[in-house]
Image (cartoon, grey):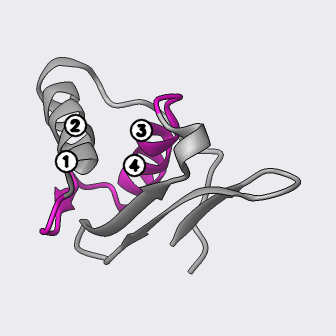
Amino acid sequence: IVTMTDANTTIGYCRYDPSGEIEYLFVGPSFRRQGYAKYMLDIVEAHLGTTLRFNPPISPLGRNVVGSYSRRQRDIPKNNCKDATPKS
């Protein structure tokens, strides 16, 4: 699980399995559309070294994230997130 927090609250978290399947991705409403989901996915992808897959069901907001991730996989080189490590 990758968890992002600030001093007061949980910003979001991403639960995944070792094969690269995203089981659950959540970003709190007041933190959405600021790049936190992308950042967590980058951390997981760098840690696992594989392209991620998304486990259904996928919410309408989740479809936006999946679509963005898929387009980025096609069009943009992978970001380097060596400094962040998920908790086991």
Q: Which mark is residue 41?
A: 4
Give the answer, above or below, for where 76 lies relative to 48.
Answer: above
Given the image, on which type of amino acid does mark 4 rest? Leu
In depth, the one of 64 and 68 nearer the eye is: 64
Real-space Cα separation, disc 4 to disc 3, in angstroms: 5 Å
In the rendered image, residue 19, in percent from the top left (x then y), is placed at 23, 73
Query: In terms of secondary structure, where does tag 1 sit?
Result: helix
Q: Are marks 2 and 3 in contact (CB under 8 Å)?
A: no
Residue annotated with mark 3: 38
Q: Which residues are magenta?
A: 33-58
Q: CA distance from mark 1 to mark 4?
A: 18 Å
Give the number of the mark in front: 4 or 2.
2
The residue under label 3 is which amino acid type?
Answer: Lys
Residue 26, image x, y percentages: 44, 58
Q: What residue did someone put label 1 on? A: 60
User: Magenta stretch: residue 46 in it?
Assistant: yes
Looking at the image, tell me whether mark 1 or mark 4 is earlier in sequence order: 4
